[in-house]
Image: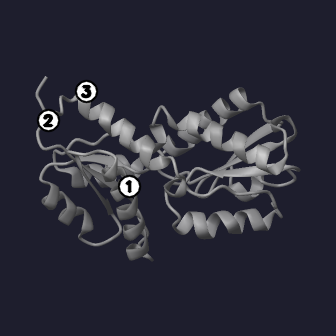
Amino acid sequence: MAQVTNPSVLLVAHGSPSDPDTQEAALTALANRVDSTLPGIRIRGATLAAPGCFETAVAELGAPLLYPFFMADGYFVHRILGAKAHGLSVLSPFGHEPALTALIEATLIAKLANEGWKSSDTTLLVAAHGSAVSQKNAETTEALTARLQKSLGFRKTRSGFVEQEPFLGDVARDLGQALCLPFFALRAGHYIDDVPEALASCDFSGPVLPPFIEWSATPTLIAQSLSDQLLQKGAP
């Protein structure tokens, strides 16, 4: 196995074309938290929507591994990031992390306890991006929803999307006691605009969890994954 010397990783997210600086700062902050737990490995962050930031970060790091802070291995990871990678190794995206399901389960259990609810009396609504050009996000979302139903025993589960059927505003109607898990990486356009608008359109009043960038355990999850993957690649 060839040894990886002077390892570096660039966390990459889509960001927000309408507000690039805010999302760039948020991803940089996440990268800094990951970096602080991995001595000897340089971790940086860059969004694709902030002009020139991805290219500048790649030049600074040399030949970093690219870690997609995306929820699925879909259009943006394959087509957009793939076109920019120019031979750099692209790791599996955050939404495919094996440890993510257990983290979500623990978070949902804590949220149910905080509300004084039982899962058997509660509907779980998973809100996700979806896509008109790729089924990867929908497939990843629906697989997660099925796992959570099996492990936590919700009264029922529903998946709804912003950019494809079934649309979030349609599946979020008349759910009774329910909570919403947004399957979004960043607090950006879809999370702050489209999801609230869809939920408001059907009078959904249950709690809505934050995007994954704001979960306290996210930096640790990413750091452990990167440590394991770099070890497999022979990093010192």
Query: Which of the labelled discs sits on residue 158, or is there none?
Result: none
Residue beneath label 2, please?
4
Q: Is residue 25 left or right of residue 55?
A: right
> Helix, strand, or loop for circle 3?
helix
Q: CA distance from mark 1 to mark 3?
A: 23 Å
- Above/below status of 232 relative to 206: above
Residue beneath label 3, please?
232
Q: CA distance from mark 1 to mark 2?
A: 22 Å
Q: Is residue 211 left or right of residue 18?
A: right
Q: CA distance from mark 3 to mark 2?
A: 10 Å
Query: Which of the labelled discs sits on residue 33, or is there none?
Result: 1
The reply to whether callout 1 and callout 3 are in contact (CB within 8 Å) is: no
Residue flagged by tag 2: what amino acid is it?
Val
What crowding class fits label 1: few (fewer than 14 Cα within 10 Å), some (14-19), or many (20 or more)?
some
Where residue 209 sits: x, y (%)? Answer: 66, 55
Q: Which residue appears at 40% of the width and 43% of the height?
A: 222
Where residue 214 sits: x, y (%)? Answer: 53, 58
Residue flagged by tag 1: what amino acid is it?
Arg
